[in-house]
Amino acid sequence: MDGALARDTNKKLLKGSSLTGWLFASPWVIGLLLFYAFPLFSSIYFSFTTYSILQPGEFVGLQNYRQLFSDELFWKSIYNTIYFAVFFVPLSIIIGVALAMMLNMKVKGMAIYRTIFFLPTLVPHVALAVLWMWLLNPGFGLVNGALDMVGITGPNWLGSEFWSKPSLILMSLWAIGQPVIIYLAGLGDIPNELYEAAEVDGANWLQKTFKVTLPLLTPVIFFNLVMGSIGAFQQFTLPYTMTQGQGTPANTLTFYVMYLYDNAFKFFNMGYASAMAWILFILIMALTAVIFMTSKRWVHYQGK
């Protein structure tokens, strides 16, 4: 009887604890359902309708998706976004790893150097866009002024169809302090014993870099590759601020999320924008899946 009574008491205590836990978690659960789950499933339905915020719209099936695939600006925005991702993500990894290795050196005052390299990350994107618009101004910008001093005529960076996207990549690379901090943490996790063993075997700096540092840094590179790819496909603030939402010149800076935003909040074509959002979701998921599947070949974890 005493055992049965103890079990009943324990069950009541567990039920009470569970109820208390759910009560404390209820604000978060309600917020998740109201602000994430409901909009998510609503957007799936809206992508099959002509919903326009002002009007409920009608169910049109796959018409929004068919219209997208015949939309020239849709394909242009995809091209611009992929162009940016293909160049920015590898360059951010190469430059980020190189900077992290430099900032990992045992030099006096290194904390100050690390702070300086991280500071651009703290600049708001709108301020960053305004700053670089001034620097890259073809008439009085500092970049073209520096090129003129060495006898080179600088291009019209943001007004040229050829140079507009490289200019945006340059701006984005200026603020990669956050990935650099993550690379620094990864470098700090590499045991010094491995470098000492490599030195005993006669390895030089380059051999230690490619045989010890980079292989053991691949988990961090993998993380930044996934996050960088997702971020690149969601590029919005810099091009939108620089072109005031116009994507000029000749739509070379019209990125996918910009075009999605225009359809949703400028043209109130929310059904069309919802279809775009789900296509973007599928593209990002497919890219992430490919990166995860290939990671087994090149990501090396310590102890394995």
Image: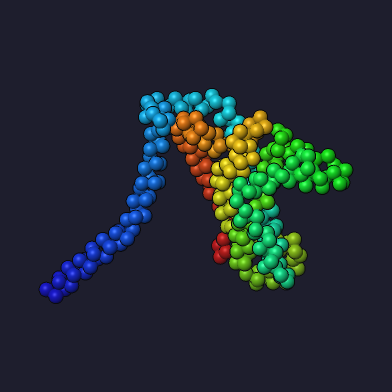
Relative to 99, say whether 163 is above or below. above
Residue 76 position by quadrant: top right
Question: x, y (%) of residue 61?
Answer: 40, 26
Q: Which residue is found at the position 61% from the left and 48% from the top?
A: 125
Q: Is residue 88 visible?
A: no
Is 29 on the left or on the right of 201, as rendered?
Answer: left
Question: x, y (%) of residue 29?
Answer: 34, 53
Q: Which residue is found at the position 56% from the left and 30% from the top?
A: 74
Looking at the image, the residue that sits furthest to the bottom is: 2
Relative to 110, say whether 231 is above or below. above
Q: Is residue 248 visible?
A: yes
Looking at the image, the residue that sits furthest to the left is: 1
Quarter of the rendering occupied by the N terminus = bottom left
Residue 59 position by quadrant: top left
Q: Which residue is found at the position 20% from the left and 66% from the top?
A: 12
Q: Nearer the viewer, residue 141 or 10?
A: 141
Question: x, y (%) of residue 230?
Answer: 55, 46
Q: Which residue is found at the position 65% from the left and 52% from the top?
A: 175
Relative to 148, say whether 249 is above or below. above
Q: Nearer the viewer, residue 133 or 115?
A: 133
Colour option used: rainbow
Is 302 on the left or on the right of 52, as rendered?
Answer: right
Q: How many marks?
A: 0
Quarter of the rendering occupied by the C terminus = bottom right
